[in-house]
Image (spheres, coloured by chain):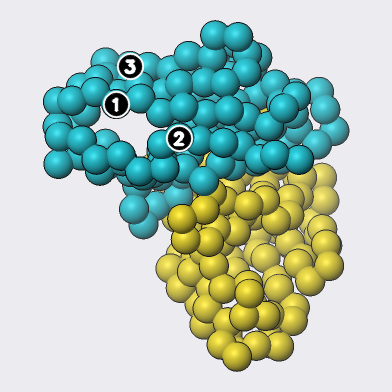
Chain colours: A cyan, B yellow
Amino acid sequence: EAGVAQSPRYKIIEKRQSVAFWCNPISGHATLYWYQQILGQGPKLLIQFQNNGVVDDSQLPKDRFSAERLKGVDSTLKIQPAKLEDSAVYLCASSLGVGHPSYNEQFFGPGTRLTVL
Amino acid sequence: DQQVKQNSPSLSVQEGRISILNCDYTNSMFDYFLWYKKYPAEGPTFLISISSIKDKNEDGRFTVFLNKSAKHLSLHIVPSQPGDSAVYFCAASIGAGNMLTFGGGTRLMVKP
């Protein structure tokens, strides 16, 4: 079974530039999550989708971050404009979705390491 | 306000001995708890979980204990192996499938 795919793996940009990350979840997984992991800390949820609807985006800095999951499968996360403090690893995860016996288990992709100079 | 805390940033254990990783939480609404393992340059990998209706869950060498009154959970690895060397995160959610709140992680080093 293919895992969660993310691209790019690494990205270096200058502050005030824009950047986009892509995630393809495990086939059949209804729920998709984006996390931000700053060095030395645990991952922090940015946004959670159930199919193509947003379940929780309370911790997403909406003035600069946006995310979409148009067809309920893959998803993109965008930052515009980037700030120095956005340097982090951006993790995408997916799960089977509410209602499935194993839906609490989230499967993570390898992450995209963003460096903002 | 850190709702999930792992107070030990690192732990070193001899191969074959027990590793005990600890986690404390403050939000009494949390009812699902999970442990993830993370190797460098990889995403976290699910290890084991426990719901608040239980106080123990076991899977092979891994056992998670939950003490609700103390708002404390621990992960026991017996016996520890060098391949277990990684960063371990505990996480909690309110309702299964909802957002996970992670601790800061504990780096485990198992020495041969």
- Residue A114, image quadrant: top left
> For the point 63% across and 72% down, which residue is it?
B84
Q: Chain of mark 1?
A: A
Q: Which mark is residue A44?
A: none
Relative image position of residue A90 (x, y in whole percent) = 42, 38
Judge if badges 2 and 3 mark residues of a common chain: yes
How many marks can you see? Answer: 3
Per the image, label 3 sits on a secondary structure element best described as loop
Q: Earlier in the sequence, mark 3 or mark 1?
A: 1
Q: Which residue is depicted at the point 47% across and 42% down?
A: A111
Please tell me which residue lies in front, A26 or B51: A26
Q: Which mark is residue A19?
A: 1
Crowding at mark 2 (Cα within 10 Å: few <14, some 14-19, many 20+)? some
Examine the rendered structure and indicate whether residue B5 appears above or below residue A110.
Answer: below
The residue under label 3 is A62
Q: Amino acid at mark 1?
A: Val
Image position, residue A71 (x, y; %) = 60, 9
- The chain letter under disc 2 is A
* Amino acid tagged 3: Lys
Q: In the rendered structure, which disc, 2 or 3, sits on the residue that comes first in sequence?
A: 2
Can residue A94 be seen by looking at this rendering?
Answer: yes
The location of residue A5, given as percent across then percent down, is 57, 36
For the residues labelled 3 and 1, the Cα–Cα distance comes to 15 Å
Q: Residue at left 60%, top 59%?
A: B37
Q: Which residue is mark 2?
A: A7
Subunit of label 3: A
Q: Nearer the viewer, residue A61 or A19?
A: A19
